[in-house]
Image (cartoon, helix red, strand yellow):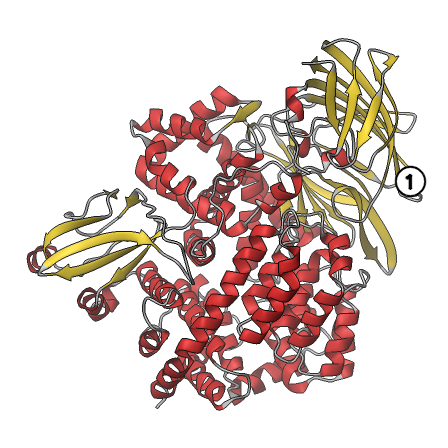
Amino acid sequence: MAELTHFYQTFQPEHYNIYLDINRATKTISGQTKITGDAQATAINIHQKFLAVSAVQADGQEVPFKLDADNEAIHIDLAKAGKTTLTITYTAPLTDSMMGIYPSYYEVAGEKKQIIGTQFETTAARQAFPCVDEPEAKATFDLAIKFDEHAGETIISNMPEVKTENGVHYFDTTVKMSTYLIAFAFGELQSKLTETKSGVKIGVFGTKAHKANELDFALDIAKRSIEFYEDFYQTPYPLPHSWQLALPDFSAGAMENWGLVTYREAYLLLDPDNTALDMKQRVATVIAHELAHQWFGDLVTMKWWDDLWLNESFANMMEYVAVDALEPDWHIWETFQTSEAAAALQRDATDGVQSVHVQVENPAEIDALFDSAIVYAKGARMLVMARALVGDAALRKGLKAYFKAHQYGNATGADLWAALGDASGMNVGAIMNSWLEQPGYPVVSASVVDGQLTISQQQFFIGDGQDQGRQWQIPLNSNYQAAPAILADTSATLGDYAQLRADNGQPFRLNVGNNSHFIVKYDQTLLDDILANLDNLTAIDQLQLLQDLRLLAEGRQISYASIVPLLTRFAGSHSTVVNDALYRVAGDLKKFVTPDSNEEKALQGLYDHLSAAQVARLGWTPQAGESNDDQLTRPYVLSAALYAKNSDAVAAAHKLFTANRDRLATLSADTRVFVLRNEVQNFGSADLFNDLLAASKQTADASFKADIAAALTSTPDDKLIATLIEKFEDAETIKPQDLRAWFRGVLANHAGQQAAWDWIRNDWSWLEATVGGDMEFTTYITVIAGVFRTADRLAEFKAFFEPKLNTPGLTREIQMDIKVITSRVDLVEAEAAAVNDAVAQAIK
């Protein structure tokens, strides 16, 4: 049931005094919240969810109230409007939903332990204390917490602790902030602390299941990130400390609570001696993302959830800006191209996708906004375009003014565009709103027509799409001066092609750098010219060429068969981004073959042909002093060689496994997953399966856990698959936060697909009860849509999910994913014969 009004319209909080008594043994919370604020009417609403409210007072007098579960509200009748102090007394459950206040479970030396943490975004603060739980309802907070404390425990929150009296921990008054950013945690924690140049205390906290040195990497990145942002934003960090906390159970990747950022353990703690470079980069970007939010999101917060992109898109761009400054040798913008850009282009091409800016009211629909490919990735690409247009000097000047104007308050997208426009002298909003408000993106066609070089834009679709004549203001970034900086019209003629080609001395190209959110379809004349000069293209240029060809094939504008002969021309590249693009295309060819068929054998032959020389060059063991590109390329080619069933690769992986049988965690993290998966697939047994499952439960190393999951879910053994699925609902073996990865692994395994699909259909209600309250839930549907490719599976998908179309928060995802599977089924039926023939020709 949608909320008819924002509760902030009836009551505007100024200050909260929150007292919580948390009992882990009985899993109960007893609380009293005092809220001083301004009542706009005598009938007001305060948010609550799952609270048992026993009394409500206004200015010390009992007042009538009514709980409304449907609207997550307490309706309160006051004697008068105006300045009021409400006192609400209540109890609440301590749940295992990973929302609100909840326990995280872990083991140290075989002993089971727990720490208590919080997750309040988007609308779960109301599960912890009654409040006006809306971003605009900023207030100051005094937090007092009592718990069933024992010796050796630590408690932390957004602000420093100021005193402890009678077992109650009192924290300093917060700055003015939104409810969803309040956080605290307690338990047996270890920590490492440092300080920035400006005196901000930096800390990393984790359970004692981890080695002390696993906190070091995050501490360094966090310290340097805060220092970078203080300089870049030209605005001081506004709190006395910045704590980073790893929670053993955490639904999201991380959460930007002001002064106490919470993370999955996998995204904060790492073994400095044995973690793959790409995982170090991932951890660094996650930390930089959350710390970007301390200003952009926390200091200045979106006014309402429809401007969620203001928080997430910006932080997603800034994580790369920051890490590029902190670790320039990583060339982290290349990762942006292979992850964010690729995800955004794929998702945004399906008709029905949300725009970056979306109107929303219902709390369940708010959670559905967190479409990582759109609000995070596309939004970040959009801001990269804006940054390129205005330049860094104007960006920093605009941000400084934006923070000054809106600090401790709220803002809208228009406020950001205005600040950047004032700083740059450009009408930034006019350009960016075509990307912000419209779903989808254009394909720009470039052709030579009657000797004239012409370009035109039209919305690009994968699958059926309703062309509504949308137009974008497209930063073309061409290498020819004749092309306009911005293409705002449907089409443009640039001039005589022969003359332009002679004058420029290089092939005509658009979107140089691949920073604008569109793809290019060159006619054969222009494409042949580019391919003839392939060696002159940068790695990003080559990635973009493969990326655009792949998407055009997905959209049925060209045939996949036409791309197959080109692949070998990229196979020798030493660049990670080129190999990423190459093996993404190669991976898409798998949908055209049936497992264990002659067609798959031919495809395996192509994989062998593409990877053999690189495997020989790089080997299975990382070498001291090798380039970052070589470290990051090795996984692509080893994975390809194993898919190809290359006998030397299979034997090499088996030899590594055998030599390290008793110390698998010490295998190089760069290649460990391939060694384990090869062993399970080609040399598997029940004993090996049980040993790995036991190792997964025992280790606190998140990377090792993930490698084991990838290996075990690939087993071809029906009995072991059945055993694995029995463990899906056993939180002692597979934590709910990790279940999606295990489920996807079995579903993508041909031998396990039916069993995994049966499980999710039979136990959907269990899944909904376990993880249904968080923003990750819909991604189970996305995962299924990413795997299914036959008409029969499409029919089954529709039969199961169409009856759920009216479930709040699921509607758009189900509609989208029916289209995703339908377009894949149509593509395979239309092109399988031609593609498989092209593969057969390529290996002759």
In this view of the protein, which residue sits in the foreground, 326 or 527?
527
Which quadrant of the figure has residue 654? bottom right
Task: Pinpoint residue 563: horizontal percent, then vertical percent.
Answer: 33, 74
Q: Amino acid at mark 1?
A: His
Task: Pinpoint residue 34: horizontal percent, then vertical percent.
Answer: 80, 20
In this view of the protein, which residue sits in the foreground, 686 or 703?
686
Which residue appears at 57% of the width and 44% of the height?
369
The secondary element bearing badge 1 is classed as: loop
Q: Is residue 259 above or below residue 119?
A: above
Task: Pinpoint residue 711: horizontal percent, then vertical percent.
Answer: 65, 74
Which quadrant of the figure has residue 571? bottom left
In this view of the protein, which residue sits in the foreground, 702 or 754?
754
Identify the image quadrant of the N terminus: top right
Identify the image quadrant of the C terminus: bottom left
Label 1 sits on residue:
150
Residue 549 showing in the rendered view: yes
Which residue appears at 59% of the width and 51% of the height?
811
Which residue appears at 49% of the width and 72% of the height?
825
Q: Is residue 60 left or right of residue 47?
A: right
Q: Is residue 818 left or right of residue 333?
A: right
Q: Is residue 287 above or below residue 182?
A: below
Q: Is residue 288 above or below residue 677?
A: above
Instruction: Categorize mark 1 by other alpha carbons within 10 Å: few (<14), some (14-19), many (20+).
Output: few
Residue 272 showing in the rendered view: no
Which quadrant of the figure has residue 661? bottom right
The total number of labels drawn is 1
Task: Pinpoint residue 742: horizontal percent, then vertical percent.
Answer: 68, 66
Which residue appears at 45% of the width and 25% of the height?
402
